[in-house]
Amino acid sequence: MKISVQINASPYQHQTADTAWHFIQAALVSGHEVYRVFFYHDGIYNALRDSRPPGDERDIVKRWSELYRQSNIDLVVCVSSAQRRGLLEQSVAKKVGGYDKALADGFRIAGLGLLMEAVIDSDRHVTFGD
Amino acid sequence: MLFIINKNSAVIGGCIAKASADDVVLLIEDAVFAVIECGESPVMRRSDNNTAAIYALSPDMQARGVREAACHKHIKFVDYTGFVELVVNHNPVRSIF
């Protein structure tokens, strides 16, 4: 079955990112396809490259990047949510003189159209938030 | 329909009251506190009606020290694999925050 996931909350503040990550792992182990993870609202903070949690803590951002490397799951960050919070795509950052290396490996920035596409094209869409 | 609730709030009671017998309610994160057997729990009130099945996510119960033995008898328990199965077997899936 084709499953998409939406994440609406920031990591560390809430359990959301952990719950979603464990759900995705279980879905993959069960043989399902995770088509896309869409990071919306404060969920965009899951994609901050410079996140540096203490060494003895789980690294949520790195965990997403590893998920992409291992499973090639499409990790999409909402462009308007990201820009409101100062997370800029490289081309936009260069245009406005902003920081252009904010996005962690494996993520891409795109519009809500990809959220709609995920909802339409997937058999199930599960939203995690707070 | 599968309802996913992640807070121990009045939302749980409202959802259970409105859910039909074909629906399923999954309690995750802090919502698992609602499965503890006590007189005021909306999960307790559910036992008087033939309404939706109620599940709780076991890893979240364990993380919060909620023991299965302390839970209402109608509660069913799932791990993340069971969570995925509930999603697969029910459509649509609605998260309530």
Image (cartoon, rainbow, N blue to C red):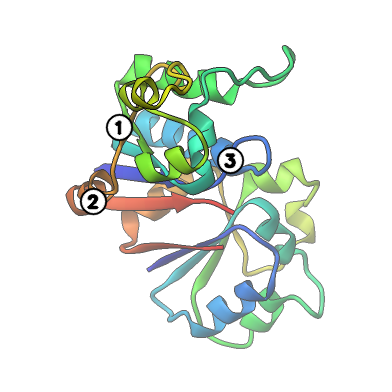
**A43 vs A5, nearest the viewer:** A43
Nearest-to-viewer mark from 1 and 2: 2
Could you tell me which secondary element the residue under label 2 belongs to?
Answer: loop
Secondary structure at numbered mark 1: loop
Q: Are marks 2 and 3 on the same chain?
A: yes
Question: Which quadrant is home to the N terminus of chain B?
Answer: bottom left
Kind of residue at disc 1: Gly
The image shows residue B41 at horizontal and vertical percentages of 74, 75
Which three-letter amino acid code belongs to the residue tagged 3?
Ser
Of the image marks 3 and 1, the number of the one nearer the N terminus: 3
- Sequence-wise first label, 2 or 3: 3
Q: Residue A90 location in percent, x, y?
A: 35, 21
Q: What residue occupies the far bottom of the structure in this picture? A: B48
Packing grade of label 1 (10 A; few <14, some 14-19, many >=20) is: few
Q: Say whether residue B28 is left or right of residue B72.
A: left
Q: Nearer the viewer, residue B39 or A68?
A: A68
Q: Around disc 3, counting alpha carbons within 10 Å, would you say few (fewer than 14), some (14 to 19), or many (20 or more)?
A: many
Q: Residues under labels 1 and 2: Cα distance? A: 14 Å
**Residue A3: horizontal and vertical position, in percent?**
30, 44
Q: Is B61 situated left or right of A93 in this image?
A: right
| Location of mark 1 (residue) | A31
> Which of labels 3 and 1 is toward the front?
3
* Residue at image mark 3: A10
**Which residue lies at the image location 61% right of the left edge and 74% below the top edge?**
B11
* Residue at x-position 30% and y-position 32%: A31
| CB under 8 Å between discs 3 and 1 | no
Residue A108: name its quadrant.
Answer: top left
Which residue lies under the disc numbered 2? Answer: A123
